[in-house]
Image (cartoon, rainbow, N blue to C red):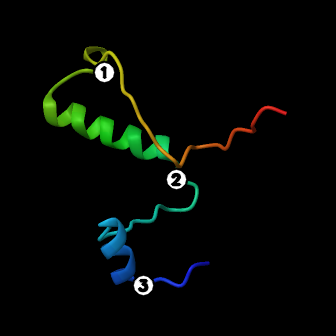
Amino acid sequence: MVDTSDEWIQSRTGIKERRLVEKGEATSDMAANIANQLLEKSGKLPEDIDVIIIATCTPDMMVVATA
């Protein structure tokens, strides 16, 4: 582990806040939750949405590389 502090991280990355999820919660769980909130807030129906694109470095499952 690299010896860092909050100040060190903020000055180099601009990151000021970090959040943790509950054990067993996946990226797709968070995405589904926010999608439902946005649908409710906007008055849209799921069939009104053509595509949702998510880019993450924290996937639900790690995929093995080609062998």
Q: Which residue is mark 1?
A: 46
Considering the image in quadrants, where does the C terminus appear? top right
Q: Residues within 10 Å of mark 3 (few under 14, many from 20)?
A: few
SS type, badge 2: loop
Residue at mark 1 to residue at mark 2: CA–CA distance: 22 Å
Q: Amino acid at mark 3?
A: Ser
Query: In x, y percent, where is residue 15?
Result: 32, 67
Q: Is residue 41 above or below residue 24?
A: above
Query: In x, y percent, where is residue 63?
Result: 70, 38
Q: Amino acid at mark 1?
A: Pro
Q: Which residue is mark 2?
A: 25
Q: Amino acid at mark 2?
A: Glu
Which disc is residue 5 wearing?
3
Q: Earlier in the sequence, mark 1 or mark 3?
A: 3
Camera-near label (2 vs 3) is 3
* Residue drawn at x 45%, y 65% as measured from the top left: 20
Query: In x, y percent, where is residue 36?
Result: 30, 36
* Residue drawn at x 19%, y 23% as measured from the top left: 44
In the picture as drawn, the residue positioned furthest to the front comes out as 12
SS type, badge 3: loop
Q: Residues within 10 Å of mark 1 (few under 14, many from 20)?
A: few
* Residue drawn at x 29%, y 71% as measured from the top left: 16
Q: Earlier in the sequence, mark 1 or mark 2?
A: 2
Q: Is residue 31 left or right of residue 67?
A: left
Q: Is residue 67 above or below residue 19?
A: above
